[in-house]
Amino acid sequence: MPELPEVETVRRGLAPVMEGAVIERAEVNRPDLRWPLPERMAERLTGARVTALRRRSKYILADLDSGETLLIHLGMSGRMLISGTMLGQFHHDHPAPQKHDHVVLHMQGGARITFNDARRFGAMDLMPTGGAHALLAGLGPEPFGNDFNEPYLAARLAGRRTPIKSALLDQRIVAGLGNIYVCETLFRARISPLTLAGDLAETAVHGLVPIIREVLAEAIEAGGSSLRDFRQANGELGYFSKHFQVYDREGDPCETPGCRGTVTRTVQSGRSSFWCPACQS
Ligand SMILES: [Zn+2]
């Protein structure tokens, strides 16, 4: 499941091809993904210029000069492929159409952006630029935004009787954090995922803000290197290898210097928490 850094990597990969460019033709090959696609989607996209490519939480938002914004959600298995353009030092020829190429944007100048999604948990929709959308409603602040800060987080966690793990996954508190980066954040902060949010000392809560940003920024940086190396050699964006300290490392020795603990997996609210019981308390 792509999380904020993966989505940001896809956005950064798409931006040079999409920003300022006109969608010459849109191919919409089925009526729905996870939900029905918007009515007359191909027609509404055709001829529109992309004025900006933004990200909100795990959504990519392409603002169009038609006054609408194309919302893109990669879901579980959605992939974006770029072809027909020079990226880095590689030129990607258009691949043969694949099964599950659900939406293809033919850009003026010859570049092509293909959205392929075998499991169809992804979504696309059109909304008025600056308008509301059900998927964006109620989202908390962006982790890198000014509204996400120490007093804000302390106020949101105060008195909460839910584990800090669940609180940080709550998109109303902070947008875009998923299981992987919450595990990594709590490890770095040496906080047990089982600790109740309201029981954390104020200093511990304040410490979480820069750690969340650091963990995400490092992952975005790793994604950036994957773009430079080229875009996974086949024009596909967004999936890059990244070293995790605890995520998916059950049974490995803890990486905290001097700690002799072992990374453990605990299921909380149906999700796996990876953590070191020896140094996270
Ligand atoms: Zn440890």
Image (cartoon, helix red, strand yellow):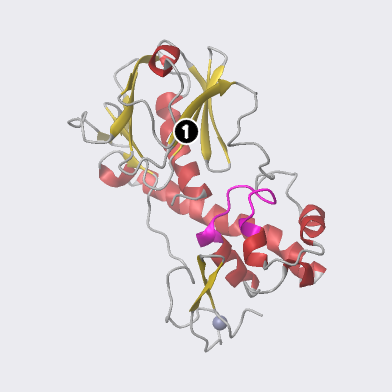
> Magenta segment: does it hold 18?
no
Which SS does the magenta portion mostly show?
loop
Between residue 275 and residue 172, name the one nearer to us.
172
The residue that mark 1 highlights is: 72
Please state the quadrant of the image where ligand 1 appears: bottom right
Q: Position of residue 237 (x, y in %)?
A: 36, 41
Q: Is residue 13 visible in the rendered structure shown here?
A: yes
| The image quarter in which residue 35 lies | top left
Residue 43 image offset from top left, x and y in percent: 40, 12
CB of residue at label 1: within 8 Å of ligand 1?
no
**Left or right of 74 on screen, residue 152:** right
* Residue 57 relative to residue 199: left or right: left
**Residue type at the position of mark 1:** Ile
Question: Quadrant of the rendered structure where residue 150 is?
Answer: bottom right
Q: Is residue 131 left or right of residue 113?
A: right
User: What residue appears at the point 80 percent right and 72 percent down from the top-left corner?
Assistant: 201
Mark 1 Cα shell of 10 Å, populated few (<14), some (14-19), many (≥20): many
Magenta part of the chain: 168-181
